[in-house]
Amino acid sequence: MARRWAEYEKEILIENYKTSTNRELEEMFPNRTIGSIRSEIKRMKKKNLLEGKKTMDTIKRAYNDRL
């Protein structure tokens, strides 16, 4: 059974979503899979708890990490 997200985890996600790559978010949440993180982001966006998109700098860093 999946473990619920704690409020402090949600706050960390809100504070860091725009400026952190998925890999960086995965490092912030060592007990969460990238799938779990992505699912929580999706849920939070639906509830308007998380707004906006990644910054251009974050997108470039994520792209460069893949190379």
Image (tube, rainbow, N blue to C red):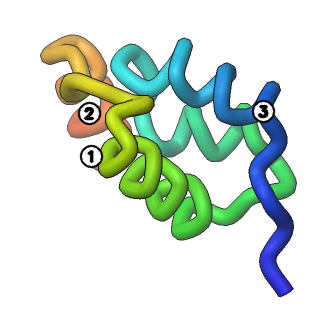
Q: Nearer the viewer, residue 14 or 35?
A: 14
**Residue 40: percent from left, percent from top:** 53, 54
Q: Is residue 50 left or right of residue 8?
A: left
- The answer to whether residue 56 is above or below residue 45 is above
What kind of residue is marked 2?
Asn
Q: Residue at x 63, y 45 (%)?
A: 26
Q: Which residue is mark 1?
A: 67
Query: Marks 3/1: CA distance?
Result: 35 Å
What kind of residue is marked 1?
Leu
Helix, strand or loop under label 1: loop
Q: Residue at x 78, y 32 (%)?
A: 7
Q: Nearer the viewer, residue 19 or 51?
A: 51
Q: Quadrant of the N terminus?
A: bottom right
> Which class describes the residues within 10 Å of circle 3: few (<14), some (14-19), or many (20+)?
few
Query: Marks 3/2: CA distance?
Result: 32 Å
> Which class describes the residues within 10 Å of circle 1: few (<14), some (14-19), or many (20+)?
few
Helix, strand or loop under label 3: helix
Query: Marks 2/1: CA distance?
Result: 5 Å
Point out the tag, 3 or 1, that comes first from the N-terminus: 3
> Which class describes the residues within 10 Å of circle 2: few (<14), some (14-19), or many (20+)?
few
Q: Nearer the viewer, residue 67 or 29?
A: 29
Point out the tag, 3 or 2, that comes first from the N-terminus: 3
- The answer to whether residue 58 is above or below residue 63 is above
Nearer the camera: disc 3 or disc 2: 3
**Residue 24: percent from left, percent from top:** 56, 33
Q: Which residue is mark 3?
A: 7
Q: Residue furthest bottom?
A: 1
Q: Which residue is mark 2?
A: 64
